[in-house]
Amino acid sequence: MKVSNRNIKYHIDAHHHGLYVKEARLRQGYKLAEVANNICDTSYLSKIESGRLIPSPEIFEKISERLNLEFPPEERLCPMDVFKDAMYEENMAIIDEHMSKNECHHYERQLIEFFRAVLDDVRDVARKIKAHVDQFQSHLSAKEESIYLLFVGLYSLKRYKWKEAEHAFKQALALAAVTKEKDPYLLMTLGQYYFKVGKMCLGFSYMEDAIVEFKRVFARKWVFHCEIMLCLEYLQVGNVTAVKDKLDMIKRLIEPGEKDLKKNIYYTLVAAVYEHEQKFILADDYYERSVAFVDGKRDERALIAQIAYLYRRQNYENMLKLVYTIDQTTVSELTRLMIDFYAYKATDPLSGDFEAFLRKDAIVYADKTLDYRHMDLFTKELSSYHRHKMSHRKVAEAYYRWEQFCLTLESVERI
């Protein structure tokens, strides 16, 4: 809708009239008739709330007084932009300070609280806030709705609701096209998603676009994260040359003297290149560096890479020593599964416990999370196990499980 000159003193455009009124009415527990009483018809108020009608200044002023509507100042930063800055800086104090100045309307606070609940993976809180925000989604501006749909997609992914996530991402992309703004976080998320489901070309394309956009907004940390994810995927497809070409640039993204886990994952990439070149002494050294503790933490990706390397080198003794140093209560479910996977492989790969682990834990997890790469690994390992046991029927069952998983992927709507 266009801005109404009649109501410009309220510093809101017509698109938001209904949102402000409806949100305030529901929050205060009023019915339509109670607010409209002695001001206007109930149907007139309903049309205002739905955005189909711009109220006259006199009526809008009376409604505002009845609901005690307060509007943010005319000159202010968009809270969505401030939140993005806080997210890219990985410093939520920025948005907290902005909100403490009362420069956000109630619905904007609800949006930001939903985004933070999704980022923190507090699903119960996210679900409750989402139910409230959904009532006003039709009133959101294109920019607000685009970032909201991005986080709806992330929320759905964390609940393994693939169709819902795809639908939300598709809508977010469409709105981004309308506003002519490329959201690097959305592009990065899509890249990660396509890597997970085995659509590598799309994954590389979206991740490269995300890097370009993060550079445009000077989000150095996120450029680093995207480059690392890109290189890890290059390693998965065996393109070590692409990783080697990026090492110098990635090194420059690490601040001199910076003491965090960035260096650890960088060391993993260097070690992988040396391993490919069969410079095993250097590879040993860099893999060892990659799992060093930094402020009591270790990068889980580097940890699994080191374990896999020791397994490939058949250095089972050192591999198991490393495994026993890991507190599995502090790592992700996937990391726990991979630790157990390599521990079984190094000790007794033909035990019934390993077969049960693959069927009941590993494959179930990969199926639930729509993880193409690990489902491929686990089903092949299960078929190999049964082949060694001369159980051809169960080999066929393992391959059938893989085929069913691929059919599931095909049933997920493509963006």
Image: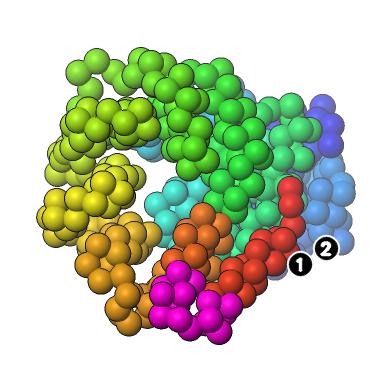
* Residue 246 appears left or right of 156: left
Residue 116 tag number: none
Q: What SS does tag 1 mark?
A: helix
- Residue 299 against residue 155 in the figure, above or below: above
The residue segment tinted magenta is 382-397
Q: Residues within 10 Å of mark 2 (few under 14, many from 20)?
A: some
Q: Is residue 97 visible?
A: no
Residue 383 included in the magenta stretch of the image: yes
Q: Amino acid at mark 2?
A: Thr
| Residue located 49% across and 65% down the image | 380
The residue identified by callout 2 is 42
Answer with the quarter of the image where residue 31 lies. Answer: bottom right
| Residue located 68% across and 27% down the image | 181
Q: Are marks 1 and 2 in contact (CB under 8 Å)?
A: yes
Residue 33 tag number: 1
* Residue 100 appears left or right of 138: left
For this rendering, which residue is in front, 35 or 96? 96
Find residue 25 and report its horizontal and vertical position in percent: 65, 59
Q: What SS does tag 2 mark?
A: helix
For this rendering, which residue is in front, 250 or 53? 250
Find residue 344 and report its horizontal and vertical position in percent: 27, 68
Q: Quadrant of the N terminus?
A: top right
Residue 304 included in the magenta stretch of the image: no
Q: Amino acid at mark 1?
A: Ala
* Residue 258 appears left or right of 48: left
| Residue located 74% across and 52% down the image | 414
Find residue 182 and report its horizontal and vertical position in percent: 66, 29
The colour mode here is rainbow
Answer with the quarter of the image where residue 32 lies. Answer: bottom right
- Residue 364 against residue 286 in the figure, above or below: below
| Residue located 41% across and 80% down the image | 389
Q: Mark 1 to mark 2: distance in Å?
A: 5 Å
